[in-house]
Amino acid sequence: MTDNIEQEYQKERAVLVGLSCRSFTAEEDSTEETMDELEALLETAGGACVGRALQNRPAPDARTFIGEGKAEEVRMLADANGADLIVFDNELSPSQMRTLEEITGRTVLDRSGLILDIFAQRARTGEGKFQVELAQYQYILPRLAGLGKSMSRLGGGIGTRGPGETKLESDRRHIRSRIDKLKRDLEQVRQVRAVQRRQRKKTELPLVAIVGYTNAGKSTLLNTLTGAGIEANDRLFDTLDPTTRKKRISDTQEILLSDTVGFIRKLPHHLVSAFKATLEELSYADLLLHVADLSDPQWREQVRTVERVIAQLGAQQIPCIMVYNKSDKCDPDVLEFTEREGVRISAKTGEGLDRLLSAVETALGRGKHRVRLLIPYSEGALLDALHREAQVLTVEYAAEGTMVEAVVDDKTYGRMQAYMTDG
């Protein structure tokens, strides 16, 4: 018990601040729910919330964002609780950040900076690190004049990981040069992905992308279905680098199943831009599995958030199956609704996964018939069409013609009836 108390005290202590305004959009506004989420983000980053303040104003204050009086209240709240960090639920301008640091005498961070810090901790692959570094530099560049106290901490806490360790030595020219280099590196990544997509199309394996709000259970679902072995903990943004695995969903259908970065409200646009090489995979998917966490009271708003990001990435036209996860933890009334709207599952217990795989096969509309065909050598064009339109499994050459085992859809099945054989 004593060890837990000591560990809690060693965490960076922060006061959380939010602003609710009539002039804000629903995406910009702060509520008790978004403040709860901000607290979860802080804990994910390794901090501890020791106080919260939610301010209501007709419009943001140009100088201090929350008003002079409220800023002073936040300073006193931080003094009383031994906090050395102030985290805002909204996005601050560089001048507002500098002014608030002067008033409170503490490092001030906004929601975007906090999320970027978490991503810096989570990135494991070279590609992921490139993308996070690009997003952080794009965030830092316009704030060079405004970031005061936090610019001097040199990796001393939340908001300073990644490229933050060299902030003091970096000028705008250096940062712009680094941004250009990272963009070139990521463009090479995109080109590699384009080659991989072309190779995937040759194998005729459809890509099914798992999307959803952060901590909705996407990685757990991929692990349960494919044994991918991804670390899946109950915390935000636990999986950053995407993983793709093959999965046979029936005797006649195999797919590529891909996990993706989780989405969240107020996702920094720098991240969406920097992670384009990863996220654009969604626009090439044949099917999306939108995983929602039914045990979260805010699941409907989370679903709308994910739908907005999908639209932003230009993937809103791709067929999508709603997958309502964590059904073992939620209210029976919610279960009744979701049964009509999508597939209800528990990725942890395996409940409903057979129904999900069946729904995936139906939605793809292919791989319905496994057939063995004898194509006469005179029908070379028919064999070419089969390679283009079906999943060819084996090809053998006999005296009478080409023996082909393939998985075909209903249309091709009808055309090939005359060539089917049991031999």
Image (cartoon, helix red, strand yellow):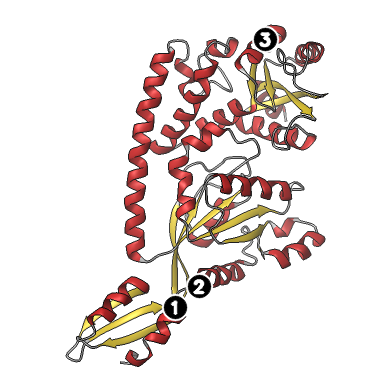
Out of 62 and 291, give the one closest to the viewer: 62
Residue found 68% across the figure and 8% down from its top: 105
- 45 or 344: which is nearer to us? 344
Q: Amino acid at mark 2?
A: Gly
Spatial separation of the CA atoms under disc 2 and disc 1? 7 Å
- Disc 3 and disc 2 in contact, CB within 8 angstroms: no
Residue 111, image x, y percentages: 64, 28
The part of the image, by quadrant, that contains residue 129 is: top left
Question: Going by the image, does 180 lie left or right of 52?
Answer: left
The kind of secondary structure element at disc 3 is helix
Q: Which residue is mark 1?
A: 409
Tell me which amino acid carries mark 1: Asp
Query: In this figure, which residue is indicated by the disc labeled 2?
Result: 365
CA distance for labels 3 and 2? 58 Å
Q: From this view, report whether residue 387 is shown above or below residue 181.
A: below
Q: Residue at x 59, y 10 (%)?
A: 149
Return the residue found at the far left.
399
